[in-house]
Amino acid sequence: MAKIFCVANQKGGVGKTTTTVNLSAGLAKLNQRVLLVDLDPQGNATMGAGINKAGLSASTYEVLLGSADVASARQRSESGRFDVLPSNRELAGAEVEMVELDNRERRLKDALAAVEGDYDFILIDCPPALSMLTLNGLCSAHGVIIPMQCEYYALEGLSDLVNTIKKVHANLNHDLKIIGLLRVMFDPRVTLSQQVSSQLEEHFGDKVFKTVIPRNVRLAEAPSYGMPGVVFDPSSKGAQAYIAFGAEMVQRIKTM
């Protein structure tokens, strides 16, 4: 059965989508079967995987509302060699419409149950807010991967996110745990980055992934070509780091 992970952080612009797309492609390169679930109405992960979000016949929106299933809505990222449950702006409406529905925080969990056997990993790209969509992601997952920049404001937001995860664990999903913290957009020349990185290692210990994702322009360019960075320029430092992170994730799963 698939291991299901949310890539979440309540702070915006910390590389959640970049991490979800490139980890998916990195795992696919390691011959893992991967489904990426785009749970953000902006649909950036959908576009980053090379799928046209404007021409979707079914998406995460229909799956959450029960008018489509994952098997019929998923699409193939040809460049990344993984499957995608795509999204677009329609998904924003699901927030309001799900309020009236039964079992509203477990709609995604129930939908994914039908395809769990098809995959080794299911990665969920969450929006940058604690919304009903994020709650659906957290209720579906076995664990949370937290990408974060090594800066002061990121530390402030981290304590809020950890408290949120604890509440969801206590009340809605007893399987949920923090899988690890991923340091992204890291610049070793910045003293503050090194200091925050050391603080994270000191405080969270082995919950901090050994892999560090450097600040890399090729990763930023890749979405405009509709492909993951690890495919767009496999030799770049950012791509190499995400492939190493994929290998580290596979190893970490074996010890879970």
Image: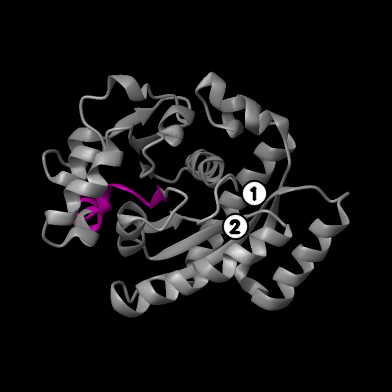
For the residues labelled 1 and 2, the Cα–Cα distance comes to 6 Å
Seen in the picture, residue 86 relative to 5 is either above or below; the reply is: above
Q: Is residue 237 left or right of residue 90?
A: right
What quarter of the picture does the N terminus occupy?
A: bottom left
Q: Give the camera-side residue of 115 and 99.
A: 99
Q: Residue 105: give x, y in percent of width and height.
A: 24, 61
Judge left or right: residue 102 versus residue 174: left
Asked if 138 appears above or below 84 in the picture, the reply is below
Q: Quadrant of residue 168?
A: bottom left
Residue ID for mark 2: 248
Residue at position x 32%, y 21% in the image: 54
Which residue appears at 88% of the width and 57% of the height? 191
Residue 166 part of the magenta segment:
no
| Residue 21 appears in the rendering | yes
Q: Indicate the amino acid at tag 2.
A: Glu
Quarter holding residue 58: top left
The span picked out in magenta is 108-124
Residue 209 can be seen in this image: no
Q: Is residue 24 left or right of residue 58?
A: right
Q: Is label 1 in a helix, a strand or a loop?
A: helix
What's the amino acid at mark 1?
Ala
Residue of label 1: 244
Q: Are marks 1 and 2 in contact (CB under 8 Å)?
A: yes
Q: Say if the magenta span includes residue 110.
A: yes
Q: Is residue 151 left or right of residue 221?
A: right
- Within 10 angstroms of label 2, few (less than 14), some, or many (20 or more) residues? some
**Residue 206 % position (x, y):** 64, 73
**SS for dot 2:** helix
